[in-house]
Image (cartoon, rainbow, N blue to C red):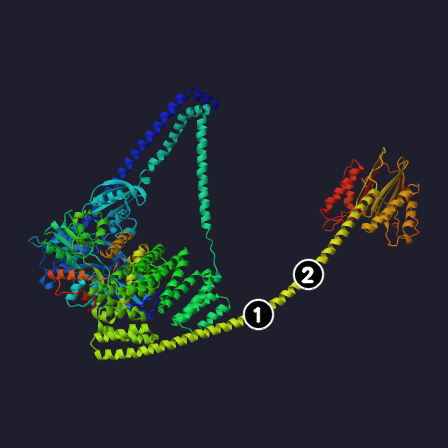
């Protein structure tokens, strides 16, 4: 039987002393992580009895490396990367899903449809493999020449490649800021081509998950509130983001971060329910698993239950 | 001169107008021409300056490139010796002090002996140069811009400037760039890249120092539009020329940015950084960057503005010349239309100003309508209520005593106290008692009137208690009553409660099977509360109410296994949860609702064919704190039951059993149905038939226990109610006795009051009568005194003899109604008797004595007796036995022969008169002094004589003159009297009297007269 509330709330006991929880974001400080910054700054984590430390990765020490070497309790990376790691025998569990849609875009340099640029040089992120473009390239027989790069848009702007992978909340905005002309026909948005697969989420090692289910639950609930607060107060949230950005000497500006935040919030809205759900979708996991398996990117199938730790 | 000019102007007015027009046109043309000429000159200067900057910067870049190219050639000839690369990179730094680092990097595994990575890197460490191999798994240099781009382009490349920080990233060291060249093997294949690192400072200093005008400046943009050289260092690297254009529609800025980034040369006028400026730009060819010179227009046109002032002045003069004839013409015409237009214009201006000021006044009033009122008493009461709620939560044994005390002290009303009691009994699961008190709290309109919030809470409590005791009709009645009041309450609180009660009504309807109405009312409740919650997104309470309503409806549908109907309420719950997240609600609230949302999702996923997601959500739910609370465990059991996970359900049921025991749940029929029966079901489904049968036996036994417990509980509760009622009756009796006693005291007090009032009234009346008779007596006396005053005044003469050579005048002003002064005269032929006197004392006795003295004087004077004899006779009459009151009169009596001027007089103790006409223009008369008349009997008064007083005016007076006092009790004084008489020229005796009367009045300055004032002046020629 479900008990009715009737305006009476149960009081929950919280730990008297805050437990330390170290979390590494997917990238350097930026609006992409606004919800976590807000949860920290507004005291949502501490109210949930957690002393959350937010770390950012570096070129020489990625989020995955930090998680693997126990420098942090939780780290953020894309769902497909997590599935890849799991299939390689590194058991991970998603504890909070940040994105509900794919942000990947392939931008062509020559105002051409990227799908017609067979065999051309395409810049791809070195640090976070763009599984989708590998799948797409192979599926459509495009035979792109891959040019892995670290970050930014300089490789593309210099003319060293014919196309580049960008994410809609970051490099795409930087290209706009660089005045780069991007007619819609020169863009290949993966979310519009049956490749709409969720991206970043927060992961912990499975053994940590099993031992600290309550802590990760508290982290997830407070992070969720952080994001919902951001959606309701974007300007104040941006102030908090800029504090982190400036504290970490990130060469960016408020306008770019504002646009990033707007796009990140858009990507959090599930296309079906039209709401921010912060959950891994079983159908997307299944789809990703099938695609990655088919094109040899997974050593074995990774299931939804495995990914979310329910089995 | 002016007139001549006017004449000329009038004569040649149309010629003058033409001249003015020509001059104006000339001035405007000169203005336009000068502007374009000055602008062109400034533009030329700017372009020239920009070219100069580009040339100078180019030389610097060229120097670097040449040195790198030279080293590349040397390196390419020694590709078989990797260790030699360290020497080359070191050498480059040694020869070029402005370079900070050099890397000669090779393709992966190029040198088999060196492994995957080989990059000979040299850098400065203080004054020395250090070399190292910098590639490794963490730093895979071939993915960096400075390797990748020249490698891919197979040509020289300048890397986009980047920020270099110290080792811990806390301090910006420099903005850097790198010049990179690919290395080729003899077959022309790219095998590596040589790059040198150069701080931008040298280049930046060269560029920034060059600008043609004081406030102009140069800037450089990278390929991505980022500022890489700019006087404002905070923009470097972080901001692009197009950044602002991303959020603001600025076509000019966008055009400039795109032109610069496309490597074009040109100039553009636009508002740059908020200042109207000209921006001159050209590509910085070798790097792919763009250099620009920004010149604010006010700087570019500074020279023009100087000319312009002069030309504008000339133009104004020209216009005046041109318009003067027209002005004259209009002046002559005195055009009514023009005047009318001006008046209309003025009126419109006044109206607009008036409306502006009205708006201002209006806004002032609006802001003033919200005074900051604080109510300390209410605040204190709120604190008391909060404290009471906390006591209740803690089940404090003193709770009810505190409520009683608060009621006794009248801090809270009886109705509110009943509400608090009911609420606590509900907490203690004494449902019937709580219902009893809720009903008492709601028995009259007291609560509704004094505190609508408690009225709503009481109805809500009654509703819940009634539902819990399965009395749906009673519950519905409470909800309906609450709704009726809340629906007419237009406040936000009223709106909230209207929705709460509406959802409660709908819940009751659902329980009664009235499904259609229930659904309609649920929808109405949702609409109301969501409207309120969305109108006040920052009020956590409304979002919480939204969540509570959604949760309850959702749970009702889930309990009824109507999962499709539950879906919209899950949606409502999620939306409300989002809104709650954005408020300042504590995390406790948020996480509880979040957990319930997760639990609901698990159920809904399970029931809509998503078992995996259901299980994942359930696991998430289990990890929450709420899942392990008393309420949370029920949700676990519910999920396990609907997903038929019997083993886990059995486990949880056992936990529920123990939780219920821990919570002290009393065995009820509901408990029997929900808990042990579910346990039985779980045992049965898990194949534990024996245990299931045992449980069934337990249930049957429990049924008896429940019955007995229920019976006992009922009896206990009824006993408690009875006891409470008895206690209340006892209290009522005590109160009645108290009231009776109070009444008695009140009656006694009332009687005392009546007696007092009667006595007081009688005394008051008597006093009034006495006062009235006294007033009448006083009026009578005043009337009589007035008559006496009239009589007294009629006793002294007001007409004075009119004879040639005689100027006589006298006046008397009593200090009260009647006075004691007197004067008089008797004229017999050429002999004039005159007298002035001052009776001792004041008022009626003095006036009577005065009348007697006056009468005696007149009688004796008319017999031709000498003044001294008259005084002797008057003294004989007025002293001795005839004067029992011992009164007396000072008296001056004179006999003046008007012909001869001979004066004989007798002074009976009176003030000495002043006689004028001497060298000093007046002195007090020196004379013998007799005793005042009436003081002692048998006195012989002595008289004196002055041969001739013609030309010597005689001024006689009483002491009401020289002893007249002001408010400070300062006397008028003899000196002042003498001074006035001496220094004032008088035309008549009358004037002397009037002048002195005025002076006395002036001296008194509003003070009441302290004595009668009588003056007489006689002047004979």
Q: Looking at the image, is B489 positioned above or below residue B287?
A: below
Q: Nearer the viewer, residue B618 or B17?
A: B618
Which chain contains the residue that carries disc 2? B
Q: Position of residue B860 (x, y in %)?
A: 91, 43
- State if disc 1 and disc 2 touch (CB < 8 Å): no
Q: CA distance from mark 2 to mark 1?
A: 29 Å
- Please name the residue that numbered disc 1 is placed on: B740
Mark 1 chain: B
B591 vs B648: above or below: above
SS class of the residue under badge 1?
helix
- Front-most of B420 and B862? B420
Instruction: Please tell me whether residue B698 is drawn above or below residue A137 in the rendered image.
Output: below
Residue neighbourhood size for the residue with mark 1, other residues' Cα within 10 Å, grouped as few (<14), some (14–19), many (≥20)? few
Q: Quadrant of the C terminus of chain B?
A: top right
Image position, residue B501 (x, y; %): 37, 61
**In the image, residue B108 lies at what x, y percent?**
12, 60
> Is A166 positioned to the left or the right of B509 in the image?
left
Q: Which residue is drawn at the image coordinates 75% and 54% (left, top)? A: B773
> Count the marks: how many?
2
> In the current view of this chain or complex, which residue is farthest to the left?
B187
Dot 2 and dot 1 within a common chain: yes
Q: Quadrant of residue A212?
A: bottom left
Residue closer to the observer: B774 or A191: B774
Residue in the image at 40% along x and 58% along y: B484
């Amino acid at each position: 039987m479900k008990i009715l509330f009737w305006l009476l709330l149960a009081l929950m006991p919280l730990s008297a002393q805050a437990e330390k929880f170290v979390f590494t974001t997917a990238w350097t400080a930026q609006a992409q992580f606004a919800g976590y910054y807000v949860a920290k700054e507004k005291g949502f984590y501490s109210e949930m009895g957690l002393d959350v430390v937010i770390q950012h990765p570096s070129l020489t020490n990625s989020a995955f490396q930090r998680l693997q070497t126990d420098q942090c309790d939780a780290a953020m990376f894309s769902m497909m990367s997590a599935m890849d790691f799991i299939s390689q025998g590194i058991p991970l569990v998603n504890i909070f899903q940040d994105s509900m849609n794919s942000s990947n875009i392939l931008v062509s340099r020559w105002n051409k449809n990227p799908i017609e640029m067979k065999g051309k040089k395409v810049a791809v992120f070195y640090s976070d493999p763009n599984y989708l473009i590998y799948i797409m390239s192979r599926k459509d027989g495009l035979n792109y020449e891959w040019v892995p790069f670290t970050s930014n848009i300089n490789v593309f702007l210099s003319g060293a490649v014919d196309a580049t992978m960008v994410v809609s909340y970051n490099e795409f905005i930087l290209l706009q800021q660089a005045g780069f002309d991007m007619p819609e026909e020169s863009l290949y948005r993966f979310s519009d081509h049956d490749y709409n697969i969720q991206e970043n989420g927060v992961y912990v090692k499975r053994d940590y998950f099993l031992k600290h289910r309550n802590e990760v639950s508290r982290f997830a609930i407070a992070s969720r509130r952080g994001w919902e607060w951001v959606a309701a107060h974007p300007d104040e949230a941006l102030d908090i983001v800029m504090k982190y950005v400036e504290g970490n000497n990130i060469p960016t500006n408020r306008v770019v971060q504002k646009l990033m935040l707007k796009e990140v919030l858009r990507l959090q809205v599930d296309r079906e329910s039209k709401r921010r759900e912060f959950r891994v979708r079983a159908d997307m996991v299944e789809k990703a698993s099938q695609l990655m398996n088919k094109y040899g990117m997974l050593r074995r199938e990774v299931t939804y239950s495995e990914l979310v730790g329910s089995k | 001169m002016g007139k001549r000019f006017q004449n000329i102007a009038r004569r040649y007015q149309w010629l003058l107008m033409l001249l003015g027009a020509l001059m104006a046109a000339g001035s405007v043309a000169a203005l336009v021409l000068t502007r374009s000429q000055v602008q062109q000159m400034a533009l030329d200067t700017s372009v020239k300056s920009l070219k100069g900057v580009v040339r100078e910067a180019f030389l610097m870049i060229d120097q670097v490139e040449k040195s790198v190219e030279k080293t590349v050639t040397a390196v390419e000839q020694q590709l078989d010796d990797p260790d030699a690369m360290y020497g080359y990179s070191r050498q480059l730094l040694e020869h070029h002090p402005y370079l900070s680092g050099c890397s000669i990097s090779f393709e992966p595994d190029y040198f088999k002996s060196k492994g995957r990575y080989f990059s000979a890197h040299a850098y400065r460490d203080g004054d020395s140069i250090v070399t190292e191999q910098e590639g490794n798994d963490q730093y895979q240099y071939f993915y960096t811009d400075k390797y990748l781009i020249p490698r891919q382009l197979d040509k020289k490349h300048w890397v986009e400037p980047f920020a270099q920080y110290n080792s811990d990233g806390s301090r910006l060291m420099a903005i850097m760039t790198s010049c990179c060249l690919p290395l080729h093997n003899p077959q022309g294949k790219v095998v590596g890249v040589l790059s040198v690192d150069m701080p931008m400072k040298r280049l930046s200093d060269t560029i920034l120092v060059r600008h043609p005008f004081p406030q102009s400046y140069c800037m450089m943009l990278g390929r991505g539009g980022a500022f890489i050289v700019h006087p404002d260092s905070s923009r470097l690297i972080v901001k692009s020329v197009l950044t602002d254009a991303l959020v603001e529609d600025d076509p000019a800025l966008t055009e400039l940015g795109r032109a610069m980034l496309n490597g074009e040369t040109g100039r553009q006028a636009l508002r740059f950084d908020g200042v109207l400026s000209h921006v001159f730009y050209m590509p910085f060819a070798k790097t792919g960057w763009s250099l620009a010179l920004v010149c604010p227009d006010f700087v570019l046109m500074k020279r023009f503005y100087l000319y312009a002032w002069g030309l504008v002045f000339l133009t104004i003069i020209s216009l005046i010349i041109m318009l003067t004839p027209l002005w004259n013409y209009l002046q002559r015409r005195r055009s009514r239309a023009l005047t009318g237009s001006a008046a209309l214009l003025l009126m419109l201006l006044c109206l607009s100003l008036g409306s502006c000021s009205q708006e201002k006044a209006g806004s002032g009033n609006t802001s003033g309508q919200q005074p900051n009122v604080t109510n300390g008493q209410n605040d204190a009461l709120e604190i008391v209520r909060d404290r009471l709620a906390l006591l209740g939560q803690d089940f404090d044994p003193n709770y009810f005593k505190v409520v009683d005390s608060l009621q006794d002290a009248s801090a809270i009303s009886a109705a509110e106290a009943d509400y608090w009691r009911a609420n606590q009994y509900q907490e203690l699961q004494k449902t019937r008692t709580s219902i009893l008190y809720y009903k008492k709290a709601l028995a009259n309109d007291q609560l509704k009137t004094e505190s609508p919030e408690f009225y709503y809470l009481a109805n809500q409590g009654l509703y819940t208690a009634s539902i819990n005791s399965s009395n749906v009709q009673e519950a519905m009645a409470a909800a309906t009553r609450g709704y009726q009041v809340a629906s007419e309450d237009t406040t936000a609180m009223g709106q909230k409660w209207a929705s709460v009660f509406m959802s409660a009504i709908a819940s009751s309807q659902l329980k009664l099977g009235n499904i259609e109405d229930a659904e309609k009312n649920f929808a109405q409740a949702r609409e109301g509360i969501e409207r309120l919650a969305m109108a006040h997104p920052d009020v956590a309470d409304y979002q919480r109410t939204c969540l509570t309503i959604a949760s309850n409806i959702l749970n009702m549908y889930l309990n009824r296994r109507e999962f499709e109907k539950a879906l919209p309420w899950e949606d409502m719950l999620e939306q409300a949860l989002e809104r709650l997240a954005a408020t300042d609600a504590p995390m406790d609230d948020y996480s509880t609702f979040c957990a319930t949302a997760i639990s609901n999702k698990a159920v809904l996923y399970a029931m809509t064919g998503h078992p995996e997601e259901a299980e994942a959500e359930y696991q998430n739910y289990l990890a929450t704190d709420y899942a392990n609370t008393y309420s949370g465990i029920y949700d676990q059991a519910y999920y396990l039951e609907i997903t038929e996970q019997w083993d886990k359900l059995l486990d949880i049921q056992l936990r529920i059993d123990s939780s219920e025991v821990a919570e002290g749940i009393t065995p009820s029929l509901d408990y029997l149905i929900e808990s042990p029966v579910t346990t039985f079901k779980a045992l049965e489904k898990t194949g534990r038939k024996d245990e299931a049968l045992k449980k069934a036996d337990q249930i049957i036994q429990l049924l008896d226990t429940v019955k007995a417990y229920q019976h006992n509980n009922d009896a206990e509760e009824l006993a408690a109610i009875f006891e409470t009622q008895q206690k209340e009756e006892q209290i009522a009796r005590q109160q009645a006795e108290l009231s009776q006693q109070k009444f008695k005291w009140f009656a006694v007090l009332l009687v005392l009051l009546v007696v007092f009032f009667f006595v007081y009234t009688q005394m008051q009346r008597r006093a009034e009568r006495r006062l009235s008779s006294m007033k009448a007596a006083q009026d009578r006396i005043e009337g009589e005194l007035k008559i006496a005053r009239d009589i007294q005044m009629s006793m002294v003469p007001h007409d004075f003899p009119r004879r040639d050579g005689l100027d006589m005048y006298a006046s008397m002003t009593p200090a009260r109604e009647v006075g004691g002064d007197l004067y008089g005269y008797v004229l017999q032929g050429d002999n004039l008797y005159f007298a002035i006197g001052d009776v001792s004392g004041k008022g009626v006795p003095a006036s009577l004595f005065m009348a007697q003295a006056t009468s005696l004087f007149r009688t004796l004077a008319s017999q031709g007796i000498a003044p001294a004899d008259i005084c002797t006779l008057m003294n004989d009459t007025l002293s001795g036995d005839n004067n029992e009151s011992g009164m007396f009169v000072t008296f001056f009596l004179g006999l003046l022969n008007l012909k001869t001027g001979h004066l004989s007089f007798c002074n009976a103790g009176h003030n000495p008169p002043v006689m004028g006409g001497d060298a000093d223009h007046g002195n007090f008369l020196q004379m013998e002094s007799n005793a005042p008349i009436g003081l002692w009997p048998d006195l012989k008064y002595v008289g004196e004589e002055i041969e001739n007083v013609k030309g010597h005016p005689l001024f006689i007076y009483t002491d009401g003159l020289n002893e007249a006092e002001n408010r400070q009790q300062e006397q008028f004084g003899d000196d002042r009297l003498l001074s006035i008489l001496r220094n004032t020229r008088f035309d008549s005796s009358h004037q002397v009297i009037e002048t002195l009367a005025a002076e006395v009045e002036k001296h008194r300055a509003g003070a009441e007269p302290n004595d009668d004032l009588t003056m007489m002046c006689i002047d004979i020629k």
